[in-house]
Image: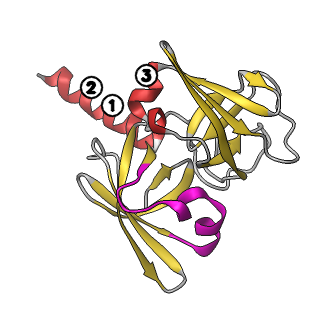
Amino acid sequence: MFSGIIQKKARVASVAARPGGLWVFIAKPQGWRLRLGDSVAVNGVCSTVAKLGRTAGFFYMPETLKKTYFASLKKGEEVNLELSLKAADRLDGHVVLGHVDAAGTVRGIEAEGESKIMTIGVKGGAGLLADKGSVAVEGVSLTVVRAGKNQFTVHLIPHTWQHTNLHAKKIGDAVNVEFDILAKYIKSLINQNHAGKK
């Protein structure tokens, strides 16, 4: 489990496609003492450290590649990293599981004073997004400003813009989106209730 507060940025060192999935190797952040089996959120995707050396290696299975844009990751890309929470950690963002729901697309980036307004298109968000609700984009815990059927907007303060990979995103770029787990459970319960009445 994560909080959506990005701790480090790093570069993709190499990517290797395999018949059963994809290996992604990322430069280890300075000062991080990773162990095999550790959980790390990579652009919002809960990832297991499967290889360790000068880089950290993560393996992604076909299901993950379907839900994210990781099949198109390239060497040199900047990624957001967050270590999994400890039981005593502060939850500064919101509950982020690292289970990405869909790859969205950046539809707009505007300046508003020192902040940025980012519009993201994503399918499947109907009923899962609400004004002033929470959403994770590239693993970053953000507040939804305006929720639409197939898109939403978020405002980024200068700190978030500068300390995550969102500053490198351009219109048309893909981003990983995870809807709020509370919204997903509520929608599931409502759907089950409706199905039981038929």
Task: Verify CB contact (< 8 Å) between mark 2 and mark 1.
Answer: yes
Q: Secondary structure at mark 3?
A: helix
Circle 2 or circle 3, nearest the eye: 3
Along the polypeptide, which appears first: circle 3 or circle 1?
3
Inspect the magenta stretch and tell me whether residue 74 lies in it. Answer: no
Q: Is residue 168 magenta?
A: yes
Q: CA distance from mark 2 to mark 1?
A: 5 Å
Alpha carbon separation for disc pair 3 and 1: 24 Å
Residue appearing at x 55%, y 54% in the figure: 141
Say which of marks 3 and 1 sits in front.
3
Secondary structure beneath label 2: helix
Judging by the rendered image, the residue that carries numbered circle 2 is: 192
Residue under label 1, please give it.
Answer: 189
Label total for image = 3
Q: Which residue is mark 3?
A: 63
Can you give x and y, in whole percent of width and height, for residue 170 in the image? 43, 62
SS at mark 1 in the image: helix
Q: Quadrant of residue 171?
A: bottom left
Q: Which residues are magenta?
A: 156-174
Residue type beneath disc 1: Leu
